[in-house]
Amino acid sequence: MADMTKILMNSEDEAKEKQNSIVVPVDDMDTVSSNSPNTVDELAMELATIKQPAKRIAIIGSRNLPITHQQMIETLSQALVMQGNTIITSGGSSGTNAAAIRGAMKANPEKLKVILPQTIGQQPSDVQNQLIGVPNIVEHPDRAMMTLADASRVCNREIIDDCNQVICFLSHTSKTLHNAVQYAEEGHKVITVFYLD
């Protein structure tokens, strides 16, 4: 009788263990082929970038933003600079770039780098006025004959190449910015994307 009780208790314990365990089918697990990139190394690089005390952060995005989004970007840019980071952006009379410039200028102009798609002279007067006092401006007279759209695409890539981390504000229909984000992914940058629609 004692043996029978022991067998019943053992089978009850096994049933409880089966209820508490999670079964993961091995054949459904992703496999890593020998020619795929080492994702552990990529994650380690991203983690190291995030932990850096001072980063070079690119802020790029749409020109068509409501004032509330511009204020948010300005505050974010100011806070990032106050933490010791450098902000890299492009010129712009309104929208993301303009807000990033205003925020960085409030915190520390020396921690702002503005890369223009062409030259200061080719920028509208309101952009030229905004850039007064910015100590670190990169111009590209070699792109003077390009369309602004083409020069902007090249400029976005230059900005991304110069940073550790990218923050992008865009809409789902923004092809140029989607291409910039894809380029940043290919360069293994830490990326934060804010969709505005």
Image: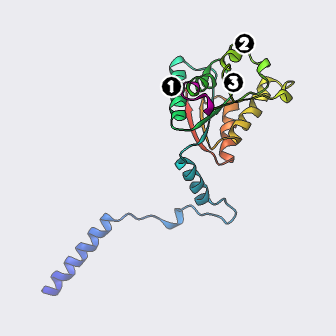
Kindly identify the residue that appears in the image at 50 percent across and 20 percent down.
Answer: 68
In the image, is residue 193 part of the stretch drawn in magenta?
no
Q: Which residue is mark 2?
A: 125
Q: Which mark is residue 72?
A: 1
Q: Residue at x 56, y 61 (%)?
A: 30
Q: The magenta stretch spans which residues?
A: 105-111
Query: Which one is closest to the eye, mark 1 or mark 2?
Result: 2
**Disc 1 or 2, which lies upstream in sequence?**
1
Label 2 element class: helix
The reply to whether the C-beta atoms of the residues labelled 3 and 2 are less than 8 Å apart is no
Marks 3/2: CA–CA distance: 11 Å
Residue 137 vs 160, above or below: the answer is: above
Q: Which residue is mark 3?
A: 91
Report x, y in % for residue 13.
Answer: 24, 73
Residue in view at x 66 percent, y 30 percent: 89
Q: Residue at x 63, y 60 (%)?
A: 38
Q: Which image quadrant is residue 173 in?
A: top right
Along the viewing direction, whichever of 126 and 175 lies nearer the viewer: 126
> For this rendering, which residue is in front, 23 or 88?
88
